[in-house]
Amino acid sequence: MTQYLIRRILIALPTILVMSFILYMILALAPGDPLSQFAANPSVPAEVRENIKKSLGLDQPAHIRYIFWLGNAVRGNLGYSFATRAPVMNLISQRLPTTLWVVGTAYLLAILFALPIGIIAAVKKYSLFDQVSTTFAFIGFSVPTFFTGTLFIIIFSVKLGWFPFIYDSTLKVTNLQTFMQLAKQSIMPIAVLALFQMATLARFTRASMLDNLPLDYVRTARAKGLEDWKVITVHVLRNSLIPVVTLIALGLPAVFTGAIVTEQIFRVPGIGDLLINSIFNSDTPVVMGIVFIAAILVVTFNLIVDVVYGFLDPRIKYD
Amino acid sequence: MVVMEPLAWYLPDGKLSPALAAEVPTRDNGGIASDGKSITWKLKQGVKWSDGSDFSADDVVFTAQYCLNEKTACGTAANFQGVDKVEAVDKNTVKVTFKAANPNPYQLFVSDSGQILQKKQFQDFTGEKAKDAPGNLAPIGTGAYKVKEFKPGDVVTYEINPNYRDANKPFFKEVQIKGGGDATSAARAVFQTGEADYGWNLQVPWTVLGPLVQSPSSKGDLVIATSSNVERLLINFADPNTEVNGAKAEPNTKHPILTDLKVRQALALAIDKKKIAEQLYGQAGVATCNIVVGVPAYESKNTKCDQDVNKANALLDEAGWKRGADGIREKDGKKLKLLYQTTVNPVRQATQDLIKADWAKVGVDTELKSINSGVFFSTDEGNPDTSGKFYSDIEMFTNGSVDIDPINYIAGWTCKEMTSKANGWRLGNPHRYCNADYDKIVDQLRTELDPAKRNDLIIKANDILINDVVVIPLVARTSPTSGKAKDLKGPLPNPWSGEPFNIADWYK
């Protein structure tokens, strides 16, 4: 096991290195220019633009820039944003709490609802509950979040006036009243995201349960007189959850990278919002920083999932 | 604007209003030297920075030195072109000397691009260190508010500057500017839910914005002003299809179709500008025949641009373009087909569709292309789709003079501004239009000091561009195009200064 872990970590490090190189080069090759905002402005002449470009280090070839970037990244410095000159790390850490709160809560809620719904739907296959939950699940993952988001805004903000649709990130929670304000402004983005993720998870849980229900060991458990409840929770559920756990764990890096569309719609200043705006502004250091951290997280969580698998399923052995 | 101030602001009517200056220097009060070579600004006395220290002429001189240093890579460096020296005569007087008589002595220290830096905060960050200055994110200013908290890309919170020179102002305890999101939802926040008091740059198709504004339950009003911005079609005079020395559309090539004046006139006559303005821009723009607009004194009255399909057809017939069997005109076996590019933007794509239909009526086949604006407006030499390379026959975007004196803008059509491989396609004339008469007018404009004669020259320059159909102006757009809550008082629609220029006077 230890040997396996060491081997995996040794593979992960060069993987991350190669990924960082590829990412950097793709971004360097990408069209666009952080100075495009000045292009049509006759009072910023070409020489001035060239000077600004030089001050951003963009006159160096891409591979030299990559080596500088890597040297700094190893020491925890992901560079400076072209647009605001703020350190990329600061920008990310400023946005992270909001993303963790909104996307994380949505993910948690999705899991809490999806599992029981999936289980009941599988056990009571083709019942009314199953039909209704299946219908909602299909709506959930086939309707895009930009549609549900706008729909929610029109219903709950414009028509009913219940919730604000602009997220106020300067709000500090000090008492019950401010917490209620936070809840009110978070409820729509969280609901939109939770609905979407819940649908996928519930469908997956149901399918996995249905795979296990007709198996011999379930019949044996029933035959030896165990009550239905115990058969489902102790025997079927434990085995069915193995792929579900994988799915949940692999989805966790996305909690960090945020939800680009939903954050945009509700003006939630999270990582997703930062990422998309940086892409639009050709602010490559910020894009690189976020994508690089996401890449590390994906590699790490893959590793964690593989290790956890061994504990969940004794049939899997590492050597 | 909220935090920092220039010496004077341009008001909506184009007149200057003093901010940090005690009065606006003019020829009459002796502030502008009679030879036009220098301007002397008297500063307000007793003004304090928000950290409590005194504002003085040293700060103004420092701001100039900061930007004159090329390594600072100051975005407003162009304001300092032709400036010989900036010196402090005494604690409250600054004198700017130009290398030659300057028709626009207000070129620096005025409006948005003329805001004054605090010497104390920036003096250790000149040259290459400029980008690391902490003041970039939280500048100390003399304005009514000061930065309380700045979260880049998200929100800035301002609070009252306790050292502001008018003790009774401003009127809000805090001001927040929130970024991100799209223009439609920003419009919604002002006009429908009232969550925001002011919404900035609401460039939304009129079919969406109109109903929000005009609805009986609307919670806001539009804040719009006619500006110098014109949505225009640019015509390529070079050949975008022939490659010479590894580059297309080099200035020494000739466009096979568009160098014929009759064809260009026909293209301009075929377009129904009114329809574009009314259907797509609504209150946010009007059809225009001129390319230099925004100030009545120098807006030409000599030009006409009503749609005339018959005349357009006649011109094309005269030029030798005959209708083919499919209705498309052809000459010497070549079809009259044009490639027309612009940025990805719903209003622009709708404009493209209308113009394509108009041109089809006169037998011109148009291929439409839309490009991501980050690419289109970039100076990326490796990318063929930039507006500067202009590797198509027609392209469309909005431009206008940033300054009230349009000399820099007008100079954008001179021969030496032609974009080419040699200059990295970075200059201002992607048409590759070159006309000695036009250049002569621009040269005269650079030295002419008499305002009335200047206006005549500007109108002449405009008329050449229109009559020679170098450019086809479509819609004079408003700027700002914003919205404010009905109970918010004070915002002045001002095309020449940033919208919050008078935020000290805003109240509810």
Image (cartoon, helix red, strand yellow):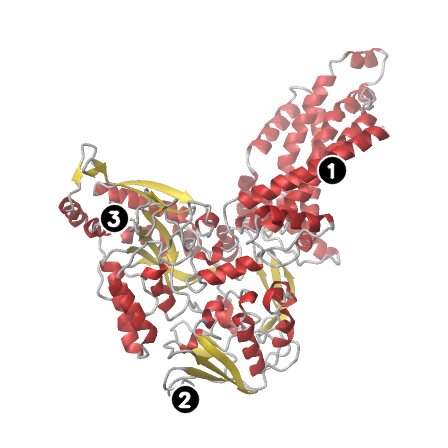
The residue tagged with tag 1: helix, strand or loop? helix
Query: Could you say which is closer to the camera, residue B248 or residue A137?
Result: B248
State whether discs 1 and 2 lie on one chain. no
Residue for point 38% across, 86% down: B27
Quick check: marks 3 and 1 in contact, CB under 8 Å? no
Residue that label 3 marks: B258
Instruction: Tell me the crowding category of disc 2: few under 14, some 14 to 19, or many 20 or more residues within 10 angstroms, Cα based.
Output: few
Residue kind at label 1, given as amino acid type: Leu
Q: Specify the label residue B30 is tagged with.
A: 2
Which of marks 2 and 3 precedes in the sequence? 2
* Residues at discs 3 and 1 both on one chain: no
| Residue B58 drawn above or below residue A76 | below
Q: Which residue is mark 1?
A: A13
Q: CA distance from mark 1 to mark 2?
A: 71 Å
Indicate the quadrant containing the N terminus of chain A: top left, top right, bottom left or bottom right: top right
Q: Residue A231: which quarter of the image? A: top right
- Where does the image place residue A174, in percent across and percent down from the top left? 75, 59
| Residue A305, percent from left and from top | 76, 31
Give the Cα distance between marks 3 and 1: 58 Å
Kindly identify which chain the residue marked by label 3 belongs to: B
Q: Mark 3 or mark 2, which is nearer to you? A: 3
Amino acid type, label 2: Gly
Relative side of B187 to A251, left or right: left
Q: Are marks 3 and 2 in contact (CB under 8 Å)?
A: no
Three-letter code, disc 3? Leu
Marks 3/2: CA–CA distance:
51 Å
Mark 3 is surrounded, within 10 Å at the Cα level, by few (under 14), some (14 to 19) or many (20 or more) other residues, namely many
Q: Is residue B65 rendered to the left or right of residue B246?
A: right
Pinpoint the chain carrying mark 2.
B
Picture quadrant where residue B138 is located:
bottom right
Q: Is residue B152 visible?
A: yes
